[in-house]
Image (cartoon, rainbow, N blue to C red):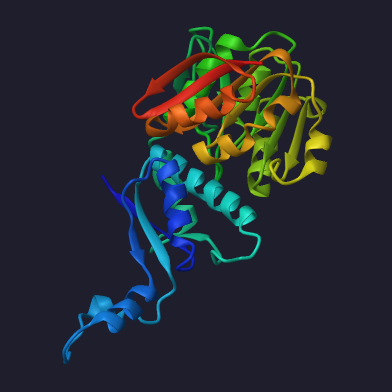
């Protein structure tokens, strides 16, 4: 398998928050380059040094960087999109710019090459009992009667290949009712909100903190012939922007939120503002190790836990208000 080096540029103060975000996405191995380490070496070294290792010397004037390696396939593409979404959310929370530019860059490979490389792995995928997810460049005969959801994720999370998305789609298929009004928080490529429309929802609102994701979600909705007046998009942070929350409105029958543990916990006091009594909340993007923490935070806000599904270290859960 080929691997791609992904560098996240931050500051010494930003290393721990960045690594915490990476752990939330399921990334458990990373390298850290920080000039602060060189300063600590100088401060604590003993004796006379005639030679300093070149790798250590490189730290002297480098920009603080956290590096991860992602597989060159569709799962890696989803992971990259998830990391970018996490960094966008972290940047929005970093009101004093203490964590630096939080830029996510690929080493020695162009974005266009990356996209074309993993396309070969992205094939039609059946999810649940009703859906098949496919990219625009693949054909699907449709003889099994499944509803075709065409998705081109570009640089936004959500190809359907990732376990978190599949778990969320399975729960959505189970709990969505015909004519429901759906809110998709952290929409990414729009895959969940588009699936909701194809499965019988009357209208959806798709929200993301990243403007690029919102634009891509709108494009993907149009590809699936979703009427524009039934598919509203919003860009911003619902945790900090009360005006945005007012624009999104309430009375939703179903909320989906496929994000990460920390953001779900931060959103837990807000979910009830959007949803009707007796309606459904579906959350995903949770690593197993933090599942109980997320469930407890949401139950503490008056939601009843209906079920949890797990797959390969990830969890999704459904609640009723």
Residue in the picture at 71% in, 15% down:
201
Relative height, residue 92 to residue 295 (above, below): below
Horizontal side of residue 288 vs 212, given as left or right: left
Residue in the picture at 64% in, 47% down:
210
Give the percent coordinates (x, y) of residue 145: 53, 7
Dividing the image into 4 quarters, which one contains the C terminus? top right
Give the percent coordinates (x, y) of residue 95: 66, 60
Relative height, residue 52 to residue 234 (above, below): below
Could one spot residue 174 in this view of the protein? yes
Picture quadrant of residue 220: top right
Give the percent coordinates (x, y) of residue 208: 66, 41
Picture quadrant of residue 283: top right
Give the percent coordinates (x, y) of residue 6: 40, 57
Relative height, residue 16 to residue 245 (above, below): below
Counting labels gives 0
Could one spot residue 139 in this view of the protein? no
Dividing the image into 4 quarters, which one contains the N terminus? top left
Residue in the picture at 39% in, 30% down:
288
Q: Nearer the viewer, residue 225 or 100?
A: 100
Relative height, residue 74 to residue 13 (above, below): above
Horizontal side of residue 202 vs 145, given as left or right: right
């Amino acid at each position: 398998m080929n691997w791609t080096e992904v560098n996240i540029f931050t500051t010494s103060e930003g290393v721990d928050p960045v690594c915490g975000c990476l752990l939330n996405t399921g990334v458990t191995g990373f390298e850290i380059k920080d000039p602060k380490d060189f300063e600590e070496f100088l401060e604590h070294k003993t004796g006379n040094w005639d030679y300093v290792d070149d790798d250590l010397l490189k730290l002297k004037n480098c920009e603080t960087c956290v590096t991860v390696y992602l597989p060159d396939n569709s799962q890696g593409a989803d992971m990259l999109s998830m990391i970018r979404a996490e960094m966008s959310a972290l940047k929005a929370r970093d009101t004093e710019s203490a964590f630096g530019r939080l830029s996510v860059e690929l080493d020695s490979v162009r974005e266009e090459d990356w996209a074309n490389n993993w396309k070969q792995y992205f094939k039609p995928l059946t999810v649940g009992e009703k859906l098949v997810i496919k990219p625009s460049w693949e054909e699907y005969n449709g003889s099994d009667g499944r509803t075709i959801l065409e998705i081109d994720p570009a640089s936004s999370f959500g190809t359907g290949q990732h376990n978190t998305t599949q778990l969320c789609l399975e729960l959505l298929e189970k709990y969505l009712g015909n004519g429901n009004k759906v809110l998709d928080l952290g929409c990414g490529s729009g895959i969940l909100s588009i699936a909701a429309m194809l499965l019988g929802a009357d209208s959806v609102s798709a929200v993301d903190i990243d403007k690029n994701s919102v634009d891509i979600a709108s494009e993907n909705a149009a590809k699936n012939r979703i009427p524009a007046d039934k598919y509203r998009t919003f860009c911003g942070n619902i945790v900090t922007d009360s005006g945005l929350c007012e624009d999104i409105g309430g009375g939703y029958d179903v909320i989906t939120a496929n994000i990460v543990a920390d953001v779900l916990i931060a959103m837990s006091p807000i979910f009830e503002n959007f949803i009707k009594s007796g309606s459904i909340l579906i959350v995903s993007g949770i690593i197993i190790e933090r599942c109980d923490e997320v469930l407890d935070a949401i139950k503490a806000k008056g939601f009843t836990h209906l079920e949890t599904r797990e797959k390969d270290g990830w969890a999704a859960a459904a609640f009723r208000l």
